[in-house]
Image: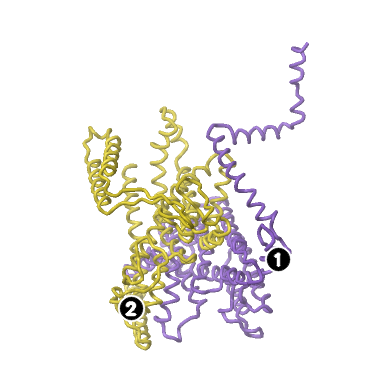
Chain colours: A purple, B yellow
Amino acid sequence: MKTISLPLSEAPVPTQAWPAPLLASLHRTAGLLFGSRLNAALTLAFGAMLTVAVPPMLRWLVLDAVLFNPDPAACRAASGACWSFIYAKSGQLLFGIYPVDERWRPALVCLLILALLGWSVRPASWTPRLLGLWIAALALIVWLMGGGLGFEEVPTSAWGGLPVTLILTVVAIGIAFPVGILLALGRRSTMPAVRIAAVVGIESVRGLPLLSILFVASIMLPLFLPEALLPDKFVRALVALTIFAAAYLAEVIRGGLQAIPKGQYEAAAALGLPFWRTQYLVILPQAIRVVIPALANTIIVMIKNTSLVLVVGLFDLISSGKAALADPAWPSPAAETFLFIGAIFFALSFSFARFADFLERRGPVAR
Amino acid sequence: MLSDARTRSIVIQCLLVAAVIGAASLLVTTTFTNLQTRGIPIGFDFLTMPSRIVISEAILSYKSRDPYYWAIVVGLANTVFISALVIVFSSVLGLIVGVTRLSSNPLAAGTCRVWVEIARNSPPIVLLIFLYSLWWKVLPPVGQALNPVPGVFASMRGVMVPSLHISMATAGVALILVAGLLVLAARLAGGLRKFRSALSWAAAAVILFGLWMADVGFSIDWPVFAGSNFRGGLELTPELSTILIGLTIYTTGFIAEIVRGGVLSVGSGQLDAGRSVGLSRAQILRLIVIPQMLRVIVPPLNSQYINVVKNSTLAIAVGYPDFLAVMNTIISKSSHSIEGVFIILGVYLALNLTLSSAANWYNRRIAIVER
């Protein structure tokens, strides 16, 4: 009797309980995790690592953390993170030492820059009009941040936090881009004096750490320049960042220029186009499209580099964080503050990286 | 006349040279007038004077009555020390993480992907300051130091590792022996070539045995907890450990991506070909994948290594006296800012040019082996 009932009990009962696609995907996952000896070992090693690391991190980050209760005593009592500090101090963290009553101005500037960045990454809006839009926006930004013409004046030494980071990034890259193109063209020039000047400029900047260039800009410029020509600290840091970005962008663009076949130059020459029109109409549009991924990488490096201006005393996000931590009323949650600042940089850089991926996936350059 | 291409090019170049000379002379004259009005002396003779600056920790021995030039050398040694360790650690870790990212195991690949994304998208200085702020929060006091591997202790005061004590005489003898061994290995005749690695191992064993027998001062110094603190071994302070760990985490992310690109650049047909002639998995890796991968990854690795040297200046953010931090102190102490800046620029250019020419030499070598 039993021998007859066995095959019957193996009838499709389990497959009814487990829908076939789910079972198949479970099977596939199990195969990926434990399919071979190597995979099983990897799963065990990484699984053990994650079970050791993740639960305490989760407990600290969320479960034991003080989230919104704006009471320093609650933070002292809790064993987890003190997010309410970030919540309570967000104004100071984001805008630094900017006058409290005027904080809506830097907030508006940040929104404006982010909105314009969002608009600019759409390939459909890449027209000469975009440049005009940015120039108008920059004028508006300088007016909003600096004041004058009806607003209370705020010197650059009182600017701080996120708007400083955003303005330095956008303006340094904006100026460095055309300078980088000129340097790249100079490096490929047939005129020896121009080529040597470009090579010396690019290579000496690329051989140096950005910090040393920032130091030179802050220590040396007061000695180099007559008093009347000396720009303030903000502009000096901006100049250092721009020089640095221009040298790196120049090398990226040179790569693109090298990828353009000679026939393109000859075709432009056959049409009788002069040098600058050849570059503007024929060569540069192709060269820049070729190197879009590398350009995106360089720009991400630039976004991260703006964090270095703190060592020459500019009040960027990190300095704002350090200043906020100095408040004796709170238990000084340094790790949380720097996580928050790191998260802002991460959001900026990561979204730009995803944008670069999107550009890459848009397909190869049509030829 | 300007329509003639050659004339135009000469005019442009003359204008450029004139502009460069004009700007340079303007800079030099204003600098000299500025220096004179402020009464700042100029010249490199301050280098031999006692520095009286404090360098909180150093690889080479340093006292504050040592001259300025020695302070500069000490700072430079710190920079080279950090860079070398970070380069070694992140290369090894980057190889592992990069290969694991290609694994079919979602758990392993995903964890490594998170690492890479965090490293690539957060500024290293924020990473360093964050790790530094964790130091006193996460690690136990010195009495209850963590002991993950025998001989290694981690506590609030820093990380203790065993150190190697070698007397100068031993080091000299060992260097000469190793050099001789290298020359021997390079000159071995073709017939003996297949025994080369065995011979090298044997020679190395003989050298070590000889050094041990001779007892000319070669010992491992284990850190031991005594009373209230550790004795012996090498102490990595929280500052130094933070920089080493932070820069290694950061650089590993980039090297992992380079390695991943390198592995992917070796076509799968190459692997099939290796399998079809009956090579084992290890042989395929050693004979087919790695040689072809090296050609692709050496140039970008080179620029990562140069980035490590440049990023080591971020040590300043957590207060470790690297070369730039020492130079900054010297400049503010001695007010020889121009000379100081020239030394800074010269040293970093020299360091990076040395690194890149070494890598270029290696690059040319593997390119020749390849074809």
For residue A279, what is the image quadrant? bottom left
List the residue tagged with mark 1. Answer: A73
Mark in the foreground, 1 or 2: 1
For residue A246, what is the image quadrant? bottom left
**Going by the image, does B322 lie left or right of B114?**
left
State the residue at coordinates (67%, 57%): A79
Give the secondary structure at mark 2: helix
The number of discs equals: 2
Q: Amino acid at mark 1?
A: Ala
Q: Residue B228, percent across and down?
A: 49, 57
State the residue at coordinates (37%, 88%): B37
Q: Residue B9, percent across and down?
A: 34, 71
Vertical order, B366 against B121 (above or below): above
Q: Chain of mark 1?
A: A
**Going by the image, does A84 lie left or right of B179?**
right
Q: Are marks 1 and 2 in contact (CB under 8 Å)?
A: no
Q: Amino acid at mark 2?
A: Ile
Q: Chain of mark 2?
A: B
Q: Mark 2, residues whose alpha carbon is within 10 Å: few (<14), some, or many (≥20)?
A: few
Give the secondary structure at mark 1: helix
Instruction: Residue lying at the far front in this picture: please name it.
Output: B227
List the residue tagged with mark 2. Answer: B21
